[in-house]
Amino acid sequence: MATTRDADPRDDLDDGRDETSAERADRNWVEVLQELRVLQTGTQILTGFLLALAFQPAFAELSAGQRTLYLFLIVLAALSAIIALAPVALHRVLFRRRAKPRVVAYGHVALVVSLATVATLLVGVVAFVFDVVLDGSAARIAVIGLAAVLIVMWIVVPVVIRFRHSTKEEA
């Protein structure tokens, strides 16, 4: 008697897991959702902070450049939420259509793009605060410092770890 498991043979990935492609897609989707939750929490806090600023009395004292940066950051915050939630919207549209691997692939791309958007938002918010509290020179120094840390922590270190991991696997 054939079971559902027999109808979906084990996939060909040799990663130490004994799972079907459907099980792998389900696991990967759960991982995407977890990453989305982490990303969204920070983004929502930043967005709330930014939205509250417009209603503060000191907001009227901002220069035209500071207001422009502020509005750019508001749009970036909204954009990052839209991009990060796009996989969830796609999942709803494709629900029960056996398209989970496509949803996971789309979620991966959306989260990478969202991370880039959030990185820009984080650096931009700090630049905005430094510009308002100190001046443009301090904002530029903060942007350069944060951008350097961000590039090292989010790009260089993961690429080095990935390279070292893949070379160990091949040896």
Image: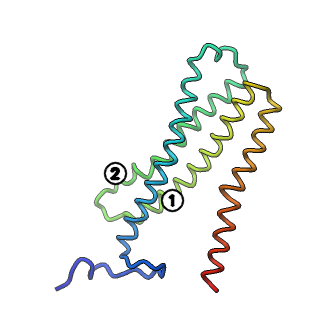
Residue 40 is situated, as x and y percent measured from the top left of the image, at: 49, 44
Farthest residue to the right: give it.
Answer: 137
Q: From mark 2 to mark 1, how far is it between C-alphas?
A: 16 Å
Q: Residue at x 67, y 72 (%)?
A: 163
Helix, strand or loop for disc 1: helix
Whether residue 72 is situated above or below residue 147 in the rendered picture = above
- Look at mark 1 in the image and give the residue it sits on: 108
**Label at residue 138:** none
Q: Residue at x 44, y 52 (%)?
A: 87
Farthest residue to the left: give it.
Answer: 1
| Amino acid at pointer 1 | His
Q: Residue at x 67, y 65 (%)?
A: 159
| Amino acid at pointer 2 | Arg
- Look at mark 2 in the image and give the residue it sits on: 92
Q: Residue at x 16, y 86 (%)?
A: 1
Pointer 2: residues within 10 angstroms few (<14), some, or many (20+)? few
Is the Cβ of the residue at disc 2 closer than 8 Å to that at disc 1? Answer: no
Residue 2 is situated, as x and y percent measured from the top left of the image, at: 20, 84
